[in-house]
Image: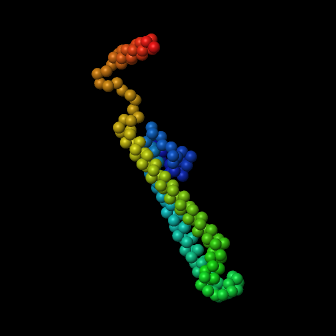
């Protein structure tokens, strides 16, 4: 019976890089489940990233407003756009909002790499299915009309010819 577990439940059984060529049906089912699972994780990570990006933009705007209202608190001596922008960037760089944004972006990047890996895995499974349909993994068979006896005789003739060549040298 086929497994109905999701990749989360089978995290130890699922491999991104190893495909069992003798159980391609199971691999295909697991592939679909993995794409669904990681696709949903990617969508959630993108939502988190967008929220972190918005929060960071709000923090930057509020910091700009604070710098403009009290420039001396941020070591701004002349109230120019360049000085304000520099003070805001320093504040944003060391903020928890900026860290959250970077972490969210990193998670999105990792999950996008996972989805690309799953695309490559899908292609590999498809190629293996094609090879299987062409009987690439089948056991060798004798051509029609050739019996084991004929093949054995041919082998004996080859061995005699090789021995004859050795004896001549």
The colour mode here is: rainbow
Q: Nearer the viewer, residue 101 or 25?
A: 101
Q: Which residue is located at x 63 percent, y 79 percent? A: 86
Q: Quadrant of the N terminus?
A: top left
Q: Which residue is located at x 59 percent, y 66 percent? A: 102
Q: How many marks?
A: 0
Residue 152 visible from this viewpoint:
no
In the picture, residue 24 is in which quadrant? top left
In the picture, residue 63 is in which quadrant? bottom right
Q: Position of residue 146 (x, y in %)?
A: 31, 21
Q: Position of residue 120 (x, y in %)?
A: 45, 50
Q: Which residue is located at x 68 percent, y 86 percent? A: 77
Q: Which residue is located at x 55 percent, y 74 percent? A: 54
Is 61 displayed left or right of 144 in the figure? right
Residue 114 visible from this viewpoint:
yes
Q: Point out the residue furthest to the left here.
A: 145
* 3 is higher (above) or lower (below) than 136: below
Q: Quadrant of the C terminus?
A: top left
Q: Position of residue 41 (x, y in %)?
A: 52, 59
In the picture, residue 154 is in which quadrant? top left
Q: Position of residue 3 (x, y in %)?
A: 48, 45
């Amino acid at each position: 019976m086929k497994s109905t577990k999701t990749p989360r439940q089978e995290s130890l059984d699922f491999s991104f890089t190893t495909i069992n060529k003798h159980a391609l049906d199971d691999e295909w089912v697991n592939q679909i489940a993995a794409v669904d699972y990681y696709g949903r994780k990617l969508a959630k990570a993108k939502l988190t990233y967008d929220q972190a990006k918005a929060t960071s933009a709000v923090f930057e705007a509020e910091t700009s407003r604070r710098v403009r209202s009290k420039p001396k608190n941020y070591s701004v001596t002349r109230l120019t756009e360049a000085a304000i922008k520099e003070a805001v960037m320093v504040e944003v760089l060391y903020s928890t909002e900026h860290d959250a944004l970077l972490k969210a972006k990193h998670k999105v990047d990792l999950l996008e790499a996972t989805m690309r890996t799953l695309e490559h895995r899908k292609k590999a499974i498809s190629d293996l299915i094609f090879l299987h349909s062409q009987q690439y993994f089948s056991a060798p068979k004798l051509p029609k009309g050739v019996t084991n006896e004929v093949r054995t005789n041919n082998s004996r003739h080859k061995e005699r010819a090789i021995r004859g060549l050795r004896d001549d040298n």
